[in-house]
Image: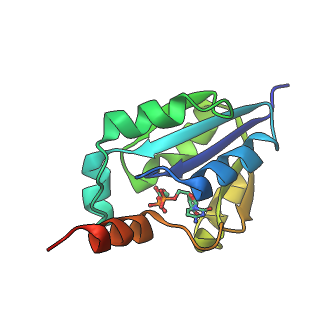
Amino acid sequence: MTRTVITYGTFDLFHIGHLRLLQRLHAMGDMLIVAVSTDEFNAIKGKKTTIRFDDRCDIVRNLRCVDLVIPERNWAQKPTDILNYEVSLFGMGSDWTGKFDELRRYCEVIYLPRTEGVSSTQIKQSVCALTPT
Ligand code: C2G
């Protein structure tokens, strides 16, 4: 039986922290599904993105370690996605530790250490610092 892994995220200003997470999750199964947050859902999350949804999806879908990209439209879709795609493992970075433990009734849940020293926010701040005022 195919061991399907799923993860969720914004993946704005795609960086090495995102890649390392996706590579590690891909290595834990046969197929990796990535649910990318839509611009509308990011507004609900209170997260302002730089790169629009379609482009964030194109970047993620073209990674060798990603097999399928689906939209993340709300907080509540995870159980349905897990059942629909017969997911064995749900994984997130450690900044989410404990937040999705209720999904253990549907599949394994794992939180992997974040890659330190990089974030979309830091990248934005670095670029702003370079821009002459
Ligand atoms: N991440 C990481 N290391 C970093 C930065 C991010 O491992 N240096 C991980 C996060 O822990 C997350 C994934 O990369 O698992 C995507 O991060 P974001 O794009 O910031 O996603 P987020 O806004 O946290 O959305 O329903 C879940 C949410 O959609 C998650």
Which of the pair 121/66 is nearer the observer?
121
Percent of width and height locating residue 56: 40, 40
Which residue is depicted at the point 59% across and 31% down? 84
Q: Which residue is drawn at the image coordinates 31% and 64% (left, top)? A: 47
User: Residue 78 location, x and y as percent?
Assistant: 53, 48
Residue 69, x across and y down, in percent: 51, 32
Relative image position of residue 57 (x, y in whole percent): 43, 35
| Picture quarter with the N terminus | top right
Query: In the image as oriented, which residue stretches furthest toward the left?
Result: 133
Residue under the image location 45 percent in, 43 percent down: 36
Up the image or down, 110 lies above or below 86; here it is below
Left or right: 25 with respect to 102?
A: right
Q: Depth check: 56 or 106 in front?
A: 56
Question: Residue 58, relative to residue 114: is it above or below?
Answer: above
Residue 57, placed above or below residue 38: above
Q: Which image quarter: residue 131?
A: bottom left
Instruction: Name the residue at 34% across, 72% down.
Output: 125
Is 31 left, or right, of 131 in this rendering?
Answer: right
